[in-house]
Image (tube, rainbow, N blue to C red):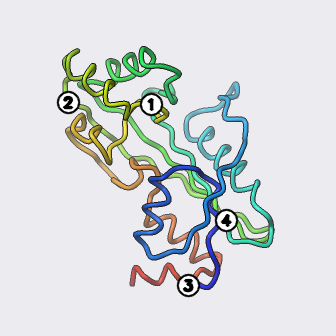
Amino acid sequence: MSEALWLASGSPRRLRLLEWCGLSVEVHPPEVDEALQPGDDPVTYAARLAVDKVGTAPAAVLALAADTVVHREGRVFDKPVDREHARSHLQELAGGWHRVTTAVAARRGEVVRTVAVTSEVRFRTLSDAEIADYLASGEADDKAGAYGIQGRGGSLVAEVRGSWTNVMGLPLEETLDLLEELGEPGSALRR
């Protein structure tokens, strides 16, 4: 890759996934309003935020942004505001299926490409003690749905249907496709 990818995200997981692909990345966490708007369904919400975030990058760079939303039956399980909020999320998600949608936006100049990927995740049945132990680890803080599959939160998960990297926060196949559409030769790593 001849130029560094402008990543409009502060997520260390997204950075790590892009680096796994051999891409040179500069991290630039954006400041955008992440409030859920009336009428936003989970996919629309994630897509709107990804486009807003990629729009914070200078037009002269190749930029990428993403937003991940955990949801079930139209309800968004956002980033918890505190541990009790996180406990509530985990209790509601335990023992059942939910969806994780990541919307990705890539931009070069005035050209913006987007994609949204949804995976299904089934949590194991969790005891109150398991939830308390997980919360005490601090891993639930600042994560959509109050868990991170790439860490201890992976032990909460019984099954994933779809992209595992999507649940981690960036669907790699689709992201590399977007970058290729915008002329990024680094996506040739997949061949």
Q: Which residue has dot 2 on it? A: 124
Q: CA distance from mark 4 to mark 3?
A: 14 Å
Q: Which residue has dot 1 on it? A: 141
Q: Residue at x 68, y 28 (%)?
A: 39
- Near mark 3 (Cα within 10 A), the count class, few <14, some 14-19 or many ≥20, is some
Q: Which residue has dot 3 on it? A: 185
Q: Quadrant of residue 33?
A: top right
Asked if the residue under mark 2 is in contact with the one under mark 4, i.e. CB atoms within 8 Å, the reply is: no
Q: CA distance from mark 4 to mark 1?
A: 27 Å
The percent position of residue 73, horizontal first and vertical second, equals: 44, 26
Instruction: Note whether 69 is above or below 79 in the view shown.
Output: below
- Lower sequence index among marks 3 and 1: 1
Q: Amino acid at mark 4?
A: Ala
Q: 167 left or right of 43?
A: left
Q: Nearer the viewer, residue 104 or 156?
A: 156
Instruction: Note whether 69 is above or below 56 in the view shown.
Output: above
Local secondary structure at mark 3: helix
Q: Residue at x 49, y 33 (%)?
A: 142
Asked if the residue under mark 1 is in contact with the one under mark 4, i.e. CB atoms within 8 Å, the reply is: no
What is the number of the mark on residue 63?
4
Q: Quadrant of residue 42?
A: top right
Q: CA distance from mark 2 to mark 1?
A: 20 Å
Q: CA distance from mark 3 to mark 2?
A: 41 Å
Q: Nearer the viewer, residue 76 or 139?
A: 139
Quadrant containing the C terminus is bottom left
Local secondary structure at mark 2: loop
Local secondary structure at mark 4: strand
Q: Amino acid at mark 2?
A: Arg
